[in-house]
Amino acid sequence: MPLTNEQTRQLIDVTQTFSGYRAAVRERRLHYRYAMRWRKIKGKDYLYCGQKSLGVRNVETEKHFDDYTKRRAELEDRISSIKARLDQMAPVNRALRLGRVPELPARVLRALYDEGAFDQGLMVIGTHALFAYEIAAGEFFEADMLATTDLDLCWDARERLSLLNEQGDKLSVLSVLQRVDRSFEAGANYGLSASNRDNFIVEMIAPEPSLQPVTSVEDDLPANPIAETKSLLSEPPYAVTAIAEDGLPVDILAPQPELFVKHKRTISAETSGRPAIQRRRDLAQADAIEPLVPTLNAAKGQYRDPDIAARFEEGE
């Protein structure tokens, strides 16, 4: 079903507004994440940023404290202001039926994005990738093509994911999931995934036997090694801003569409250990995306996050 002109105009407005929000969130996370504070040690004041000491109190460290605190407050104000604008746009997005991504996976993706997980090569490789392709193609898929009760996330696993809180302490992926929904716990799918009370499953996948667990936090989720996913990570992600059922935007970083099609055709042909119903669904998704590949590739530059692509390419 093609998007209407009104839907397209609204999507452009939301995407432009969200890009400003994303830029402010990223600057804060990368450069102003930790609150600076003074700590008295043996009678002297030392400036700390997270867990790192920046030196004893003097004119230089006081100026650094003032400049840093001012910019951090400016970013927080900007984030709050743009978030309010996005909240105002949400009812219009819902009224125009742009809210496609189910609310829970959208909240999970936002939380992981805000923590920098997608900067480290994480991609959405399962059914939820279709929400990116449909927006980029300007054509919504039928609901039965998108129905799923799991969220598959994959990265190359050459290094563990590194997530930190505002005090500089390490975060686990599981703790981020539990911040979204307290009922998430490890143990689904033979211990390789997390599930909530409604049995919605989040699975962390790696192309090869990987470092365990996903992060360096003890008892975090393990990565499920699936060799066939390696090809999906051979190019920087296809980054699209979609709209969730709550009317708010969500970034989806999916594999390049031609890689997704090849992957789906490969696993649809696997008869050993993969249920026939899943193989038919894989084939149906490949058949749906393949005719759109020329259109999606023509817009590839538009759907490319330069910062994430640069980090991805540096790791090659």
Image (spheres, helix red, strand yellow):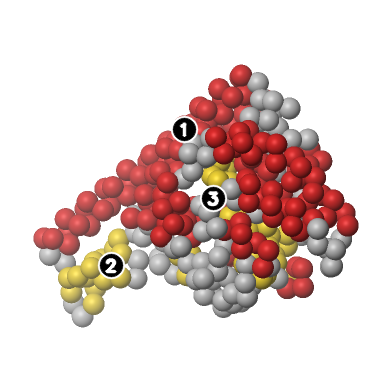
Q: Distance between the residues labelled 3 and 2?
A: 36 Å
Q: Farthest residue toward the bottom? A: 42
Q: Is mark 3 on a helix, strand or loop?
A: loop
Q: Distance between the residues labelled 1 and 3?
A: 21 Å
Q: What residue type is labelled 1?
A: Thr
Location of mark 2 (residue) = 48
Residue at 16% in and 55% down: 63
Measuring from the top left, give residue 93's x and y in whole percent.
Answer: 62, 29
Q: Distance between the residues labelled 2 and 1?
A: 34 Å
Residue at 69% in and 52% down: 262
| Disc nearest the viewer among 1 and 3 | 3
Q: Earlier in the sequence, mark 2 or mark 1?
A: 1
Q: Is mark 1 on a helix, strand or loop?
A: helix
Measuring from the top left, give residue 56's x and y in whole percent.
Answer: 17, 70
Location of mark 3 (residue) = 237
Q: Is residue 142 left or right of residue 128?
A: right
Measuring from the top left, give residue 75's x and y in whole percent.
Answer: 35, 44
Residue at 51% in and 67% down: 161
When the figure is inspected, residue 85 is found, relative to residue 125, above or below; the finding is above
Asked whether the viewer can see residue 302, the reply is yes
Q: Which amino acid does label 2 sit on?
A: Tyr
Q: Which of marks 1 and 3 is nearer the N terminus?
A: 1
Within the image, what quadrant is residue 4 found in?
A: top right
